Amino acid sequence: MRNLLTDIPGLIVGHATDLALGSGVTAILFDEPATASVSILGGAPGSRDTALLEPEMTAGGVDGFALGGGSCFGLDAAGGVQAWAREQKRGAVFGGVQVPVIPQAIVFDLTNGGDKNWGRFSPYREMGYAAAEAATDGAFALGTVGGGTGATTPLVKGGLGSASMETRAGYKVAVITVANPVGNPLVGQGPHFWAAPFEQGGEFGGLGFPSHALSAEDLKLRAKGLPDDPNPPTATTIGLVVTDAPLTKAQAKRLAIAAQDGLARAVHGAHLPFDGDTMFSAATGKGEAVSPQVLTVLCHAAMMVTARSIARGVFVATALPYPGALPAWKNLFG
């Protein structure tokens, strides 16, 4: 296990990163259509093709996902991923037309620095295509890459993370996230992560919780866009949790909800009014769907890997190359 989304067989992951822009796109594509759903709990989401993921909707499998920056402009990225998938003959055929289904969620990173004066059309469609073209079933970069390029947190740089585990039921669960939350993944103003109880193998520093009992100062809300903050909040955590177990669409919905629990364990102040917190889910397994008991095990795993992935993305991130850019965790505590 590489502790990455690509520990799930049958999918590929690729990034497109533009440091001058201060934003990027991550594409995830499946070898075969996957059963999928979504949970949207943030107050200000930005997404494409999420309604069709609800269990009562007709759509069956999806061909991939896009996770990106750019706020509403960034929703162009799914079109680029879709164009690549269509060239590869992926997607269902309707009346002789290949139609790949590529849902997307975005984060708001427009005010993080970087040159956002791109002219008439945004660059995100081309970045979506480039991310799909670069996709691999092997190791991929974390931190200030792809959809996590422009991500921030209240105190340090945010970023793209991933984590995986094998469950007692014999199935794997893995996740990829972009941590750009309004709330704080750190305990107070120190180096410790709220996700510390779930950490495996020192993947985000191995510091554990603070040695002292948590104080009122530790529990204080540190968030972007509060009344004493003149800056508009760069907001939203998004991600995709995948299992190799066979699930129904309704079970996939439950898996996405469980991943949101991991988000809330990793970020002190989640699902806030300015956040667009969105977690996709997908299942690549074939055959009879798992029992409710096995689904319980998978949901527990989804919660844990999501919390770990968010912290890992912040831990690995590097600061953007601009004067006055938000420092990375490693700049302050590494």
Image (cartoon, rainbow, N blue to C red):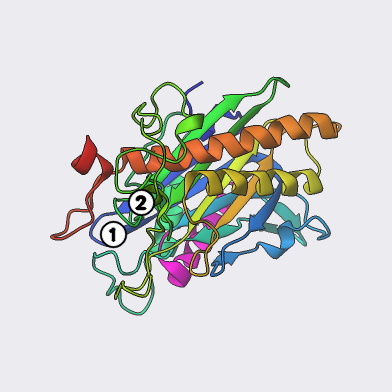
Near mark 1 (Cα within 10 A), the count class, few <14, some 14-19 or many ≥20, is: many
Q: At which x and y percent is residue 334?
A: 22, 34
Examine the structure image and report whether residue 280 is included in the region drawn in magenta.
no
Mark 1 vs mark 2, foreground winner is: 2
Of 122 and 83, which appears nearest the observer? 122
Q: At which x and y percent is residue 32?
A: 68, 39
* Secondary structure found at label 1: loop
Examine the structure image and report whether residue 86 is included in the region drawn in magenta.
yes
Near mark 2 (Cα within 10 A), the count class, few <14, some 14-19 or many ≥20, is: few
Considering the whole magenta stretch, tell me its main secondary structure.
helix
Report the residue at 32% width, 47% height from top: 144
Return the residue at label 1: 22
Disc 2 residue type (three-letter): Glu
The circle drawn on residue 217 is: 2
Q: At which x and y percent is residue 83?
A: 53, 57
For marks 1 and 2, the one nearer the N-term is 1
In which quadrant of the rendered view does residue 173 lie?
top right
The circle drawn on residue 119 is: none
Report the residue at 66% width, 62% height from top: 50
Q: At which x and y percent is residue 206?
A: 36, 26
Extent of the magenta region: 69-90
* Secondary structure found at label 2: helix
Does 129 appear above or below 197?
below
Q: Could you tell me how far apart the alpha carbons at marks 1 and 2 are, in whole angstroms?
A: 32 Å
Classify residue 325 as left or right of residue 203.
left
How many labels, in total? 2
